[in-house]
Image (cartoon, rainbow, N blue to C red):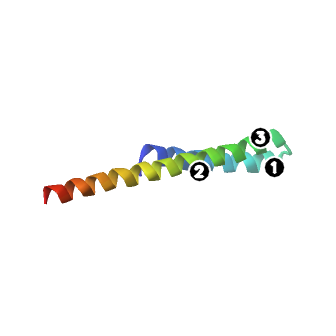
């Protein structure tokens, strides 16, 4: 797992908490901010996964070239 994936997971968790607290205290702005954080986290985590997969593919190609 890389930095982007970790940050994405953190943003998703933080967003879930904000959304639930906002809903509990009837604060629509906090609830909406939480949903936004979750979306941002999903995107960041996705970017991290793509970055990791590309890195692994490059390493695999390097290994094949060495063989």
Circle 1 packing at 10 Å, graded few (<14), some (14-19), many (20+), is: some
Q: Nearest the camera: 6 or 42?
A: 42
- Which residue carries the number 3 mark? 30
Judge left or right: residue 35 versus residue 47. right
Rendering coords of residue 64 (x, y %): 19, 59
First-in-chain label (3 vs 1) = 1
First-in-chain label (1 vs 2) = 1
Q: Residue drawn 49% across and 47% down? A: 47
- Which residue carries the number 2 mark? 42
Rendering coords of residue 28 (x, y %): 83, 43
Judge left or right: residue 41 versus residue 66. right
Q: Residue drawn 52% across and 50% down? A: 45
Q: Nearest the camera: 32 or 48?
A: 48
Residue that extends furthest to the left in the rendered view of this protein: 67
Circle 3 packing at 10 Å, graded few (<14), some (14-19), many (20+), is: some
Q: Nearest the camera: 62 or 18?
A: 62
Rendering coords of residue 55 (x, y %): 34, 50
Of helix, strand and loop, which one carries label 3? helix
Circle 2 packing at 10 Å, graded few (<14), some (14-19), many (20+), is: some
- Which residue carries the number 1 mark? 23
First-in-chain label (3 vs 2) = 3
Q: Residue drawn 41% across and 52% down? A: 1
């Amino acid at each position: 797992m890389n930095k982007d994936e970790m940050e994405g997971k953190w943003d998703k968790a933080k967003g879930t908490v904000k959304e639930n607290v906002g809903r509990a205290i009837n604060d629509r702005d906090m609830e909406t901010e939480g949903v936004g954080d979750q979306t941002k986290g999903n995107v960041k985590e996705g970017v991290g996964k793509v970055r990791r997969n590309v890195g692994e593919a490059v390493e695999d190609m390097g290994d094949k070239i060495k063989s």
